[in-house]
């Protein structure tokens, strides 16, 4: 389903770092459809060339195979950009616990390289992927942007440091920045494979293979699952913002409702059973809680509504219907 983007000037040249990844490729696709010139930079460590193959023949799209840990690559990519949508990062709490050094190199040093290159190139605005992990051990629900706790993982630390660096660059160098704290994004092109696959594509592929999905804990942990088209909308709104109060700050990007893991599996089974009735009978397995996992996550999206005009189009049910259809068509 194509959802109309908020109206955006088609003359803009947008750099999307991590543009061959899950969220990045959806941003690239939406912006090319809007008529924008788009440069994708990716080192393909977690992104996939297949995610952008359909864009490579478009004259408005260009690919730079580069690494944000290399300042020269960042400078080359930023040289013609009006806006930067910085999505490149090493995600996953467990990955950061197993290898905090590489997570820091990519998420902090790479982020700083991109800020510096954007500043030097005269980029109008730097919009970056922040994370709900920044809320850390704060138990308050819903999560409000100006009230955070202590980080619970190396990954969370790196994403909080991003916000601190962005704030300094806006104050010290005059670079306009907006951080988008993503809450459990899901949708088409999210990779179901690998040790650090997100829960929704991982469960989908297991159920499609008639395997029991394994929930960490008793299934009562809950998340504000957010369909990728809501995220695309928010990135475009962040580029469009003209109100000074809307700039140089951070926003939650979510739907504003939470679903626990038991409910999630039932919704997945319900959607997948339309394609294969046997999936409805597959039992669920339970395992130990993962280190660094936050029990509950729910976003307040009032700030985004008030300052950016954010109005998410997809709740979890509508998003899962779209996502499951894509997975069944592309991965079966």
Image (cartoon, rainbow, N blue to C red):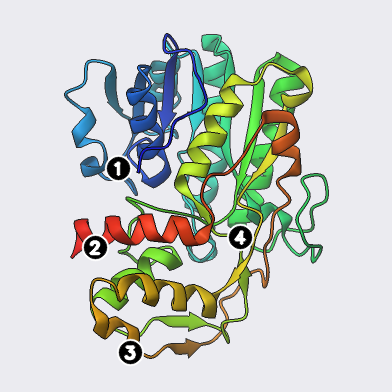
Q: Which mark is residue 199?
A: none
Element at badge 3? helix
Please name which of the two marks, 4 or 1, marks the residue nearer to the observer.
4
Disc 4 marks which residue?
Answer: 224
Residue 135 place in picture, x, y as percent: 73, 56
Please name which of the two marks, 3 or 1, marks the residue nearer to the observer.
3
Identify the residue at image location x=57%, y=44%. 312
Element at badge 4? loop
Disc 1 marks which residue?
Answer: 44
Task: Work out how far the residue at label 4 is from the one at label 1, CA to CA, in angstroms.
Answer: 28 Å
Q: Are marks 2 and 4 in contact (CB under 8 Å)?
A: no
Identify the residue at image location x=42%, y=88%. 284
Disc 2 marks which residue?
Answer: 328
Identify the residue at image location x=23%, y=29%. 55
Task: Work out how far the residue at label 2 is from the one at label 4, CA to CA, in angstroms.
Answer: 24 Å
Q: Is residue 26 left or right of residue 304?
A: left
Q: Are marks 4 and 1 in contact (CB under 8 Å)?
A: no
Q: Are marks 3 and 4 in contact (CB under 8 Å)?
A: no
């Amino acid at each position: 389903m194509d959802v109309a983007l908020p109206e955006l000037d088609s003359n803009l040249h947008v750099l999307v770092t991590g543009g061959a990844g899950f969220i990045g490729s959806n941003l690239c696709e939406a912006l090319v459809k809007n008529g924008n010139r788009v440069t994708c930079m990716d080192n393909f460590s977690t992104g996939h060339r297949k995610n952008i193959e359909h864009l490579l023949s478009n004259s408005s799209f260009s690919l730079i195979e580069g690494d944000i840990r290399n300042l020269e690559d960042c400078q080359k990519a930023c040289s013609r950009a009006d806006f930067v949508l910085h999505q490149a990062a090493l995600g996953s709490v467990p990955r950061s616990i197993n290898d905090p050094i590489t997570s820091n190199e990519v998420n902090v040093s790479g982020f700083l390289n991109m800020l510096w290159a954007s500043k030097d190139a005269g980029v109008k605005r730097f919009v970056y992927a922040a994370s709900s992990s920044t809320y850390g051990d704060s138990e308050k629900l819903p999560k409000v942007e100006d009230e955070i706790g202590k980080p619970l993982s190396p990954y969370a630390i790196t994403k909080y440091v991003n916000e601190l660096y962005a704030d300094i660059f806006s104050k010290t160098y005059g670079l306009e920045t907006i951080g988008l704290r993503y809450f459990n994004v899901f949708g088409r092109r999210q990779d179901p494979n690998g040790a650090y696959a997100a829960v929704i594509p991982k469960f989908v592929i297991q159920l499609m293979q008639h395997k029991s999905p394994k929930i960490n804990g008793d299934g009562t942990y809950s998340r504000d699952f957010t369909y990728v088209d809501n995220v695309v909308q928010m990135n475009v709104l962040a580029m469009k913002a003209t109100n000074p109060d809307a700039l140089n700050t951070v926003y939650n990007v979510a739907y504003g409702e939470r679903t626990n893991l038991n409910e999630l599996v039932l919704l997945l089974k319900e959607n997948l059973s339309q394609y294969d009735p046997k999936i409805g009978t597959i039992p669920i397995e339970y395992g130990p809680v993962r280190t660094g996992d936050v029990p509950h996550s729910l976003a307040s999206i009032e700030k985004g509504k008030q300052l950016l005009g954010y109005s998410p189009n997809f709740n979890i049910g509508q998003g899962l219907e779209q996502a499951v259809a894509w997975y069944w068509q592309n991965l079966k």
